[in-house]
Image (cartoon, rainbow, N blue to C red):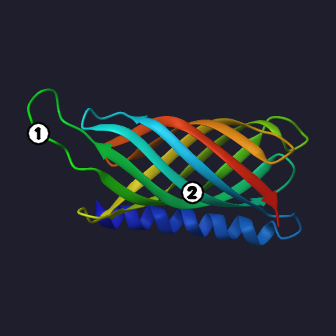
Amino acid sequence: MKKSTKIIASAVAAVALFFSVNANAQSPKFGIGLNVGVPTSDAYGLAIGGDLRYQFDIDKQLSVPLTAGYTRLVGKEIGNTGIDVPSYGYIPVKAGLKYFFDTTGSGLYGLAEAGAGFAVGNYSGTEFVYSPALGYSWSNGLDLAAKYEGIGNTGYAGIRLAYGFKL
């Protein structure tokens, strides 16, 4: 599993690099975001994290985002068993495609990202990470998205509130 995760992450990065070379004529964007959500596993009570996103525009409607950050799944007690699950932190590194439904390059968009999640703290290893989202981007730089992020056999459903600007 670890070898296949590395192969998938490398392939995603290579595709992103290919698109970024073709996107040099467009103005890249940089964003910073806060992610908050509800984990899909009963072992965790909250997902919280932050990320940085570098986005290459292919044209006004299609972009290639490269995202990295930190996410923490906060552990909790399972039922009334007295067993506390430790929190799980990971660094997601993802590349993907972002499509704006409006020809202006803002407004409603769909996003699909994939990559690798590198465990930190008491855990170790690398897992495949994927993250589909539906969001809205305002022309003033604010961005709000409903997203799901899956890692290994768990994940979370949440929101991403971000601010982006052109470089």
Provide the secondary structure element on which disc 2 rests.
Answer: strand
Total marks shown come to: 2
Looking at the image, residue 116 sits to the left or right of residue 81; the answer is right
Q: Quadrant of the N terminus?
A: bottom left
Q: Position of residue 109 (x, y in %)?
A: 73, 37
- Comparing 101 with 7, the one in front is 101
Circle 2 residues within 10 Å: few <14, some 14–19, many ≥20? some
- Comparing 14 with 152, the one in front is 152
Task: Give the residue displayed 47% in from the left and 64% down from the top.
Answer: 9
Q: Position of residue 118 (x, y in %)?
A: 38, 64
- Comparing 164 with 96, the one in front is 164
Relative to 14, residue 106 above or below: above
Relative to 86, residue 167 above or below: below
Q: Quadrant of the C terminus?
A: bottom right
Q: Position of residue 77 (x, y in %)?
A: 19, 36
What distance separates the C-alpha of mark 1 from that of mark 2? 31 Å
- Quadrant in the rendering for residue 121: bottom left
Sequence-earlier tag: 1 or 2: 2
Q: Dot 2 corresponds to which residue?
A: 51
- Quadrant in the rendering for residue 124: bottom left
The amino acid type of the residue labelled 2 equals: Asp
Res 107 label: none
Looking at the image, residue 166 sits to the left or right of residue 9; the answer is right
The amino acid type of the residue labelled 1 equals: Ile
Circle 1 residues within 10 Å: few <14, some 14–19, many ≥20? few
Looking at the image, residue 70 sits to the left or right of residue 25; the answer is left
Task: Give the residue displayed 28% in from the left and 50% down from the top.
Answer: 87
Task: In the displayed orientation, state which residue is furthest to the left.
Answer: 81
Res 83 label: 1
